[in-house]
Image (tube, coloured by chain):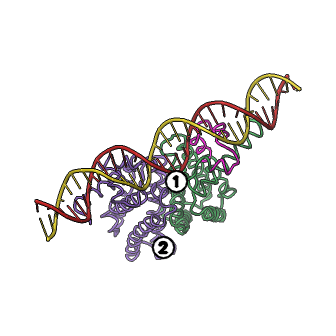
Chain colours: A green, B purple, C red, D yellow
DNA sequence: CCCGGAGTGGACTCACCAGTACAGTACCGC
DNA sequence: GCGGTACTGTACTGGTGAGTCCACTCCGGG
C-alpha cells in the first residue's frame, strides 16, 4: 500500500516542506506553498499525511533531527584524540554557521513540540543520542588519562550539548557564531586542563 | 495624549498578552483572548497599538527581556566572591525551573524576531547587557587573582551566557534542569580552577 | 456647564487557509 | 486486458482571526 511512485511523492512533499520552513518559518508556510514547491496538491498531501499539517511537521522534524547528527559525522563518532575533538568542534561551528539564522528543528520544536508529546519525543531522542556520543568520547579520553578522573562524563557531555544549543540559539538571533565558539572552546579547554587539575 | 487611565489600560493589555503567551504560546493567542483577559476590546488594542499584533508582541518582548535581568538581581550585579557566584547560579536555575516549559522571550524571538529588526534588537540588547554584567564579575574575580590571567573575561562571559541559553532551551523541551545545571557548573568550575591552572 | 479629545464597546468585513468531496487517471497483480 | 487499488487534480466549505468603523461615554480644562 505504497508504491515506488507514492514513496517518491511522499518524500518530495517532506523535502518541500522542510525547505519552505527553512526559508520562511513554520507559521508563514501554508500547505499550498508545500504543494506548489513539490508539484503536488492538497489531495496528495492528505493522502500521505491523513492527520494533516501536524503529521507533516512531525515528519519534517524527524528528518531534520536525523540530519543534525549526520552532519557531524564522521567526527562525532570518533572523539578519541584532541585533534579529533578540534575537528568536530570546527565541523559543528561550520555546520551552524552555514545554517545561519534558520534553525528548522528549533523552530519546529518551539512551534509544534510544546503541546504534542510526539514532537517532544523527537527532540528528546535527538539530545539523548547526541549526548551519548559525546559522553562516549569523554569516557574514552578519560580512560586514556587525557581527561581528569574527577570529571563525570555524563554531566560534562550534558554541559557540552547545552553549550552548543545556547551558542546556536544566540547565533540564530544575532547572526554571529562568536558565542558558539567561545562556549565550545571553554568546554574543550575545561576537559583538556582537567587531567592536570586538582581532583 | 495619554491619561492615567489610558496608561493603565495599555499596561493591562501588555500584561494580559504576556500572561496568555506564557500559558499558551504566541501562535495560539488571539487578540480576542488578550481582550477578554484584559477586559478590553479590539478598539482599545488598536488604539494603543496602531500597528496591531506585531507592535503589541514587540512591547511584550521588551517587557519580558527586562524581567529576565531583574529576576537575577541583586546577585547578578555583585559577582564578587565565589559565594556570590553560587547564589547567582542558584537564582538562575530556580528562575528558569519555575518558568518551566514556557519561555515567552524565546518563543517571541523565534516567532517575531526572525524577520523584524526591531525584535532582533531587543534580544541583542538583552544579551549584551547580560554579558556585560557577567564580564564585570569575571573581571573583578580576575583582578583579585581568583580567576587565571589567561582567561579572557569577554569570551568567558559569552560562553557562560551561551551555556545558560542552551540549558534553558533544553529545559524547555525536556522539562529537566539537569543540563542547565551541568552547563553552569562546568563554567563555574572552569573559572574556579583557572587560577591554579597553566597560563 | 460644555466642548473636544481621550477612551471604549461591539458588530462588521475580508482574506486566508486547513481540511473535504469527488472527480478522474495511472499502476500493479492476475 | 481487466479489475481494483493507489494515486492525483480541483473546486469547494467552514471556521477563524486580524484589522476597521462608527457610535458612544468619560473626563479634564476653560
Residue located 49% across and 71% down the image: B155
Residue B188 falls in image quadrant: bottom left
Provide residue A106's location: percent of width, then percent of height: 54, 53
A59 inside magenta stretch: yes
Position of residue C23 measured from the top left corner of the image (x, y, whole percent): 71, 32
Element marked by disc 1: helix
Q: Which chain is indicated by disc 2? A: B
- Going 58% across and 45% down the picture, which residue do you hit? A57
Q: Quadrant of the N terminus of chain A?
A: top right
Q: Nearer the viewer, residue B125 or C22?
A: C22
**In the image, A8: left or right of A162?**
right
Can residue A191 be spotted in the picture? yes
Image position of A47 with respect to A169: above or below: above
Please provide the residue range marked out in magenta. Answer: A33-61
Write down the chain letter for disc 1: A
The disc placed on residue A158 is 1
Q: Which image quadrant for residue A98?
A: bottom right
Q: Residues within 10 Å of mark 2 (few under 14, many from 20)?
A: some
> As displayed, is residue D7 above or below residue A33?
above
Q: Which mark is residue B151?
A: 2
Q: CA distance from mark 2 to mark 1?
A: 23 Å
* x and y percentages locating residue B177 in the rendered image: 44, 50
Characterize the local packing of mark 1: few (<14), some (14-19) or many (20 or more) Cα atoms within 10 angstroms: many
| Quarter occupied by residue A175 | bottom right
Query: Which is nearer the eye, B192 or A110?
Result: A110
Q: Position of residue B62 (x, y in %)?
A: 38, 62
Amino acid at each position: 500500500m505504497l508504491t515506488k511512485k507514492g514513496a517518491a511523492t511522499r518524500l518530495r512533499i517532506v523535502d518541500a516542506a522542510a525547505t519552505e520552513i527553512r526559508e520562511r518559518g513554520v507559521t508563514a508556510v501554508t500547505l499550498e506553498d508545500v504543494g506548489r514547491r513539490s508539484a503536488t496538491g492538497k489531495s496528495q498531501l492528505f493522502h500521505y499525511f491523513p492527520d494533516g499539517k501536524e503529521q507533516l511537521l512531525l515528519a519534517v522534524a524527524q528528518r531534520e533531527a536525523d540530519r543534525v547528527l549526520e552532519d557531524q559525522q564522521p567526527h562525532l563518532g570518533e572523539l578519541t584524540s584532541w585533534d579529533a575533538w578540534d575537528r568536530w568542534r570546527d565541523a559543528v561551528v561550520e555546520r551552524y554557521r552555514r545554517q545561519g539564522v534558520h534553525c528548522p528543528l528549533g523552530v519546529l520544536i518551539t512551534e509544534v513540540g510544546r503541546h504534542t508529546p510526539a514532537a517532544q519525543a523527537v527532540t528528546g531522542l535527538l539530545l539523548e543520542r547526541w549526548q551519548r556520543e559525546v559522553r562516549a568520547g569523554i569516557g574514552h579520553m578519560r580512560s586514556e588519562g587525557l581527561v581528569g578522573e574527577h570529571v563525570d562524563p555524563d554531566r560534562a557531555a550534558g554541559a557540552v550539548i547545552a553549550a552548543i544549543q545556547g551558542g546556536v540559539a544566540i547565533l540564530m538571533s544575532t547572526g554571529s557564531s562568536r558565542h558558539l565558539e567561545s562556549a565550545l572552546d571553554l568546554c574543550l579547554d575545561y576537559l583538556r586542563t582537567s587531567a592536570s587539575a586538582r581532583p
